[in-house]
Image: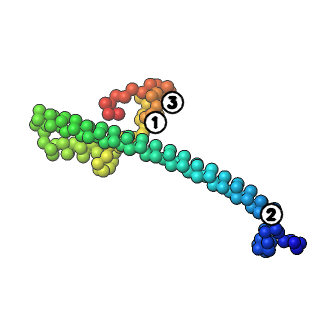
């Protein structure tokens, strides 16, 4: 056998790979495959989480749709009862809807509540999520049925 020639022949020597360089390449390939497998496993876990979130969101959406349908039914019943006993017309209702809609300054078909309210004791603004004033400590009691 000539110097630089492997037992398998001249082809491998010409390709520049010795048995030692092949084993080094195998180690690199092993680590690369392990890395890729870890990334695939992480992606699979992310997909499973996303599927669970989608199922949960779908169930919540279905619940909300049922709630909205029930509220529409109740509102219709209330309107018909009030209209009958108070002799109101559809025009009266639409006028009131527009009046309420304009309370936030825009006639856009939405009832937008401010995220803030005034403390009755110190007069400072506080976020609706707080049950008491963060400045003076006064408890906040809702004085309106609809906030």
Identify which residue is drawn at 87% across, 72% down: 1
- The residue singled out by tag 2 in the image is 19
Circle nearer the viewer, 1 or 2: 2
Q: Earlier in the sequence, mark 1 or mark 3?
A: 1
Which quadrant of the view contains residue 70? top left
Query: How dense is the environment of label 2, judged by Cα within 10 Å: few (below 14), some, or many (20 and up)?
Result: few
- How does the figure colour the protein chain or chains? rainbow
Identify which residue is drawn at 48% across, 29% down: 133
Badge 3 marks a residue whose secondary structure is: loop
Badge 1 marks a residue whose secondary structure is: strand
Q: Out of 105 and 64, give the one closest to the viewer.
A: 64
- The residue singled out by tag 3 in the image is 134
Measured in 3D between alpha carbons, the distance from the residue under mark 1 to the one under mark 3, in whole angstroms, is 9 Å
Of all residues, the one furthest to the right in this rendering is 3
Identify which residue is drawn at 43% across, 34% down: 128
Q: Earlier in the sequence, mark 3 or mark 2?
A: 2
Which quadrant is the C terminus positioned in? top left
Badge 2 marks a residue whose secondary structure is: helix
Query: How dense is the environment of label 3, judged by Cα within 10 Å: few (below 14), some, or many (20 and up)?
Result: some
Measured in 3D between alpha carbons, the distance from the residue under mark 3 to the one under mark 2, in whole angstroms, is 74 Å
Above or below, 34 relative to 11: above
Above or below, 116 relative to 7: above
In the image, is 13 to the left or to the right of 73? right
Q: Earlier in the sequence, mark 1 or mark 2?
A: 2
Q: Is residue 105 visible?
A: yes
Q: Position of residue 36 (x, y in %)?
A: 63, 55
In the image, is 132 to the left or to the right of 6? left
Q: Position of residue 122 (x, y in %)?
A: 46, 29
- The residue singled out by tag 1 in the image is 127
Identify which residue is drawn at 26% across, 37% down: 71
Above or below, 95 relative to 3: above
């Amino acid at each position: 056998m000539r110097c630089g020639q492997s037992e398998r022949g001249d082809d491998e020597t010409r390709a520049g790979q010795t048995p030692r360089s092949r084993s080094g390449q195998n180690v690199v390939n092993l680590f690369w495959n392990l890395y890729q497998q870890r990334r695939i496993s992480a992606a699979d876990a992310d997909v499973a989480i996303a599927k669970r979130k989608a199922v949960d969101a779908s169930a919540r959406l279905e619940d909300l749709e049922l709630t909205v349908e029930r509220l529409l039914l109740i509102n219709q019943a209330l309107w018909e009862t009030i209209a009958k006993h108070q002799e109101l017309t559809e025009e009266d209702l639409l006028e009131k809807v527009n009046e309420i809609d304009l309370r936030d300054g825009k006639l856009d078909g939405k009832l937008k509540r401010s995220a803030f309210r005034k403390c009755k004791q110190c007069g400072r603004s506080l976020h609706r999520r707080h049950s008491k004033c963060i400045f003076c400590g006064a408890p906040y009691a809702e004085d309106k049925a609809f906030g």
